[in-house]
Amino acid sequence: MNDRRSFLAQSAAGLVGAALVSRAGAASIPEAPIRTSAEMAPPLIPSTGRPYHPVATLNGWSLPWRMHNGWKEFHLVAEPVVRQIAPGMDAHLWGYNGQSPGPTIEVVEGDKVRIFVTNKLPEHTTIHWHGQRLPNGMDGVGGLNQPQIPVGKTFVYEFEARRPGTFMYHPHADEMVQMAMGMMGFWVTHPKDPSFMRVDRDFVFLLGAFDIEPGSYTPRVNTMLDFNLFTFNTRVFPGIDPLVVRRNERVRIRVGNLTMTNHPIHLHGHEFEVTGTDGGWTPPGSRWPEVTADIAVGQMRAIEFIASEPGDWAFHCHKSHHTMNAMGHGVPTMIGVDHRGVLERITRLVPEYMVMGERGMADMGEMEMPLPDNTLPMMTGSGQFGPIEMGGMFTTVKVRDGLARDDYKDPGHYKHPTGSVAYEWKGQVPVAARPEPVAPAKAALKVRKPGGHAGHH
Ligand SMILES: [Cu+2]
């Protein structure tokens, strides 16, 4: 317990104002804690209200609350934020309480929840509580369910968290712009019975997509499909936290998709089952094993598995363009193009000219190319064996023996048992026998034009 407390105390260092929550108890509105760091805070163990097993938010945190006359009260502040997308790149976004995505809200089935929402954006906003059963006037669609929250004003949402499960929140006001700017957050309603669907580690994150020109800071908000940064909780590889788990633990990963396209999320080394959606828990008889779960736009999925295989396992979107960072998508395919002669002539005019991609693009994983300021390499990150050549929606699940129950710190590279890594064959390699190709000229001669039909001349 002592370890756990000191761990929590460390995490509180990243929270500005969290310590003030209890002092603000006398005031009418709870303090709004602000977080400035993109490091993952350890799960927030509840000190008031009903007990539950807290979730771990990748590169994020859970919002502290106060109990007030039987209500669980939170304070969200919608505001411009600076989010570090990965070391080397900051984005100027809109979010909640200092970050995009906003803090995760964790409540328990049956809780009476009151959320104060203060609008510090330059335009009106609302919050929609995606997936919740609640009074119609609390659903947050601006104009339909409530007036928009004007600039500078605070509105109050009140409802009972009736159904346990996985939810998210986002604006339903100037939605295209506000979501393109990063306004979204995760919500978990824990079951009243803490032993129901109990797992050892419960990770949550949202899928996001941004269009930020290399060298700039603010997303283009009118982009419809051609996004260039694909994120887990508004971070890209190598900035995304690894999912650290102790071997043989039961692990749940909850993912919500607030981008404009689907993301097939793929786990290496293990099979999992989809145990929940934003509509609730899936009945056990309806589950089947998968290694990839396609998460459509606006959907959430909870996947579960026993982390029985030690190692550093890739965990990523299977759309290969979504595991790359900005830049380079307009580069023509150069594989097989012979640059000899051309390069020499161009170099006379442009001394730093570099030919890209004539042998594939793997070179770019190691290349130290000059990039505009505030721009991440398209393929980046390195492992113990060299460049990983990834970006975007890519991280690792790190399964280790002997971790403490509450240890989420990166354990470093996996130490492979001797003889368990792919290795180079040093012996003779026989030349593969290939069938004789059919000479194209002869083959063409055998082709006869169809005849005998009226209209063919
Ligand atoms: Cu994707």
Image (cartoon, rainbow, N blue to C red):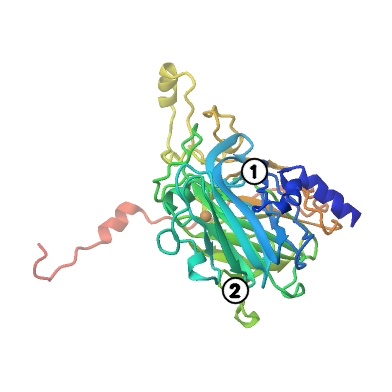
From the image, tell me which residue sits under label 2. 280
Could you say where residue 355 lies in the image, as x and y percent from the top left?
A: 47, 30
Residue 46 visible in image: yes
Name the residue located 43 percent from the left edge and 19 percent from the top edge: 350
Could you say where residue 40 lies in the image, as x and y percent from the top left?
A: 71, 48
Left or right of 392? Residue 420 is right
Q: Name the front one of labels 1 and 2.
A: 2
137 or 421, which lies in front? 137
The N terminus lies in which quarter of the figure? Answer: bottom right
Could you say where residue 435 lies in the image, as x and y percent from the top left?
A: 48, 58
Q: Which amino acid does label 1 sit on?
A: Gly
Q: Is mark 2 on a helix, strand or loop?
A: strand
Name the residue located 81 percent from the left edge and 54 percent from the top edge: 407
**Residue at the extreme right:** 2
Left or right of 405? Residue 26 is left
**Residue at the extreme top:** 348
From the image, tell me which residue sits under label 1. 239
